[in-house]
Image (cartoon, grey):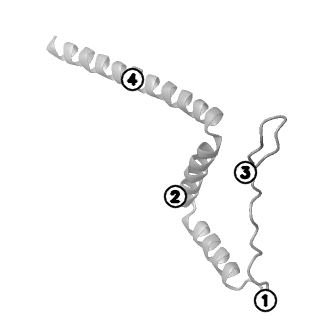
Amino acid sequence: MKLIGYVLLACLILGALQYAMVVLTVMLILLALWGCIFRPREMLGIVTYIVILGLLQVHPWFCFAVIVFCTLVWAFRRVGTGPAEKVTPPKLLEYKPQGSPGRSPD
């Protein structure tokens, strides 16, 4: 009889843990949707990071080969291209004081 009580208690504990995992999963999905709507840039970064970590875990040699290839391309890029031109951003919010209507600015 005591054994049946322990088995039932274990079943209740496992059921409570399963319910807690379902609640946490639903909360995670809701937070991911909220992030996609209000912070898409950060969510794209997190998703990219997760994908890269997954690829590193599943295909480590292929990822190492890609890193070596990109490093070699960067090291032996065409010489003589010179530095990129410095581009200044436009001043969109520049303050220009104006006089009141009917008066010329001083």
Kindly indicate whether the residue at mark 2 contacts the one at mark 4 (C-beta within 8 angstroms).
no
Q: Which residue is mark 2?
A: 57
Q: Which residue is mark 1?
A: 80
Residue positioned 76% across, 76% down in the render: 84
Q: Which quarter of the rendered picture does the N terminus lie within?
A: top left
- Disc nearest the viewer among 2 and 3: 3
Crowding around mark 3 (Cα neighbors within 10 Å: few <14, some 14 to 19, many 20+) is few
Q: CA distance from mark 2 to mark 3?
A: 49 Å
For numbered disc 1, what is the local secondary structure? loop
The residue lying toward the viewer, choosing from 86 and 57, is: 86
Q: CA distance from mark 4 to mark 2?
A: 28 Å
In the rendered image, the residue lying farthest to the top is 1
Q: Which residue is mark 4?
A: 20
For numbered disc 2, what is the local secondary structure? helix
Crowding around mark 4 (Cα neighbors within 10 Å: few <14, some 14 to 19, many 20+) is few
The residue lying toward the viewer, choosing from 83 and 62, is: 83
Q: Does label 2 or label 3 sit earlier along the sequence?
A: 2
Q: CA distance from mark 1 to mark 4?
A: 61 Å
